Image: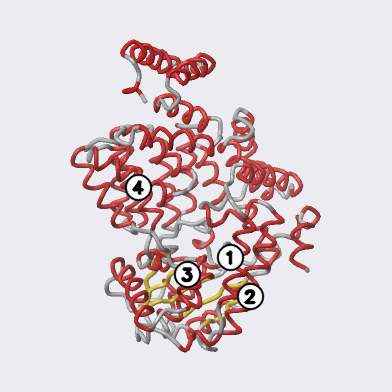
Amino acid sequence: MSNQLSTNAKRKVDALVMQMQQAFQRQDWDTCGQLCMQIEAWEPSNPETANVRGIVAMQSGDAQGAEHYFVNAVNVAPENIGFQLNLGKLYLQQGLSEDAFPRFQRVLELKPDDLTAILGAGQCLLQFGEVKQAYDLFLQATEKHPNDNILDMALFRAAFQLNDLNEAKACLHKVLAAEPHYAEAYLGLGQIALQEGDFKDAEKQSLRALEYNPRLNIAYAFLANIKIFNHDDDTLIEQIKKYRQAMPKDSAIYMDLSFTLGKVMADLSEYQRAFEYIKKANDIKYEHLNYNHEAEIAHLHAIVALTSEEQFQTTSKLEDDTPIFIVGMPRCGSTMIEQILASHTSVESVGECNFFEAAVAELSDSKAPLTLEKMQDFSAQQWRELGSVYMKKVRDVHPDARYVVDKTLSNIRFVGAIHQALPQAKVIHVKRDALDTCWSIYKNHLLGPVYSYGFHLGQLAYYYRAYHQLMKHWVDILPEDVMYALNYEEMVEHQDIETLSLLNACQLEADDACFHFEKSNNVTITASQAQVRKPMYSSAIGSAKPYQENLHILVDILAR
C-alpha cells in the first residue's frame, strides 16, 4: 500500500497515477495500460490502477473482470466514493440490485447528497418493488438538486409506476421546459400515452424522441412493441439497421437492436431473417451471462424432493384471504390475467413485487440463511410470522384493498410455503402452450437474472420441463382448492366463460370492468404493456409455428 512506500517511491507512484488518469481521459488505452503496469510494479495493490482496469474491462463488456478490479479497489480504499459508485453501477447494469444497493448506501453514508448514489439507490428500490420509497427518495433529492433533468426523469419513472400519471406528466413537462429536445422525455410521454390506450400518440411521441436522438435504442424497442411494421416503414427500418451495424458486434446496444429487428422482420413475415436476428441477440446475451443452469434445475428438483403432502398439516392458520397469487412461466398470459382481476372494484395489484421472497429473506439470518430443509421444520407460529411480514409489505402499498394480486411469477418455487404461511390465499396458475411460451420468452428480451435460462434454447427447454414437473407436484400434494389452473388459449377463445370461472375461483362477484380489462388504468411495466391495452386477440396462439424448423432443440426436449 502507498503508506508502505518510501517518500521518493510515493512521489513516483503519484506522478504515474496522474499520467495514467490523463491518458484515461484521452482514451489512450495503450498508454493507460503501460502506466498501470508501471504503477503495479511499485505498488501491486494500488486502488487507482484497479479502478481504471475495472472501467476498461467494463467498457469492453468483461463484467467479471470489471467486478474483480472494482472489488479490489473498494477493499483497499473503502472510503473512496468513486470506487463504490463504479462497483454499484456495474452490479446495477447486470441486474444485481441486491449487490448494488449496499454500495450506493455506503456512498450516501459518506456523502448524503451524492446524486449518482441517490439515483442508483432509487433504481434498486424500484427493482425491489419499493416504488413509494424510491419516489420519496427522489422527491427529497429535488430539494438539493431542483433543476436536474436526470433526477426529474427518475421521479417520472417512480410516479408512473405508482400510477400517478398527472405527476408523471408534470415531471416530463418540467424537463421539456428546461430542455425542449430531451428525447427520453418524449419517450416518457409515449409510455403514458400507451398507458392511456392512445397508440397513435404513443407512436408519435416515440418518433419525436428518435427525431431528437436517433441513437435512443430503447425508443426503437418501444416502437416495435406498440406497432406492426410494414414496408411504409422502410426508411425507419433502414435507420435501425444502420445504427446496429455501427455498434460493436457484442455490445448491449447491438443486442437490443437485434431483438428489435427480429420483431420487425416478424411483422414483415420474413420469419427466417427474424429468427436470425433473435438468435444473434440471445447469443450475445448468453455469452455475457453469469448463470449456473445445472444449479437452477437442481434447485427446482430439490423442491419436489423435499416437499410432501404431510407438511401441509402445519399452517399459520391466518384467516387473511386478501392475497391472490398469479404464478407460471413468463409470457404465459399472466399480465392479462392480472389486468382482468385488477379491473375489479375490490382488487388492487402489487405487480411483480417479489414480496414473498423478500419476507423469507427478512426472517433469514445472514450468517445462517433459511433453506428448504429448515422451512420444512417451521412451527405454526413461524409460518404465521412469515405470512404477517408478507401482508405488512402488501398493506404498505395498498392499506385498504379488499383483495391484492401478486404477479411474481418466480413464486412457483414458493407455492407450498405460500399455502402454509397464508392458507386462505388463492393461487392462480396460468398455463399456455409450451412451445409458444418458450418461443415468446426467447424472442423477448426479459430483464433480470431470474430469467437467465431464457437465452439458450436447450436450457430454456430443460427449465420448462423442470417447471412443469414442479407445478404438477404442487397439484399432487396441495389441498384441492388451493390452486386454480387457467389455460391461456381457453381464456382467449372463451373470454366471458373463462373470466367468470376465474372470478368464481377468487370468490369475486362478476364485474363488467373485468370483461373490458384493456380499458383499465392500472399500470403495467412488462413486455406485455402494449398487449394488455388491446381487447382480447388470438394472434399469439400458435406464434411459434412459423419458426419450428429453427426450434428443433426446443421441440425435441419438450417432447421427451
Q: Earlier in the sequence, mark 3 or mark 4?
A: 4
Q: Position of residue 89 (x, y in %)?
A: 41, 39
Give the SS element for disc 2: helix
Look at mark 4 in the image and give the residue it sits on: 102
Which is more foreground, mark 3 or mark 4? 4
* Disc 4 + disc 1, Cβ < 8 Å: no
* Disc 3 + disc 1, Cβ < 8 Å: no
Q: Position of residue 75 (x, y in %)?
A: 38, 37
Q: Quadrant of residue 11?
A: top left
Cα distance, mark 3 to mark 4?
A: 32 Å
Cα distance, mark 3 to mark 2?
A: 18 Å
Horizontal side of 507 relative to 459 (left or right) equals left
Look at mark 3 in the image and give the residue it sits on: 338
Q: Amino acid at mark 1?
A: His
Which is more foreground, mark 2 or mark 4? 4
Horizontal side of 385 relative to 31 (left or right) equals left
Crowding at label 2, few (<14), some or many (≥20) Cα neighbours within 10 Å?
some
Q: Earlier in the sequence, mark 2 or mark 4?
A: 4
Q: Quadrant of the N terminus?
A: top left
Cα distance, mark 4 to mark 1?
A: 27 Å
Crowding at label 4, few (<14), some or many (≥20) Cα neighbours within 10 Å?
some
Q: Earlier in the sequence, mark 4 or mark 1?
A: 4
Which is more foreground, mark 3 or mark 2? 3
Q: Amino acid at mark 2?
A: Glu
Query: With respect to residue 262, does 454 lie above or below?
Result: below
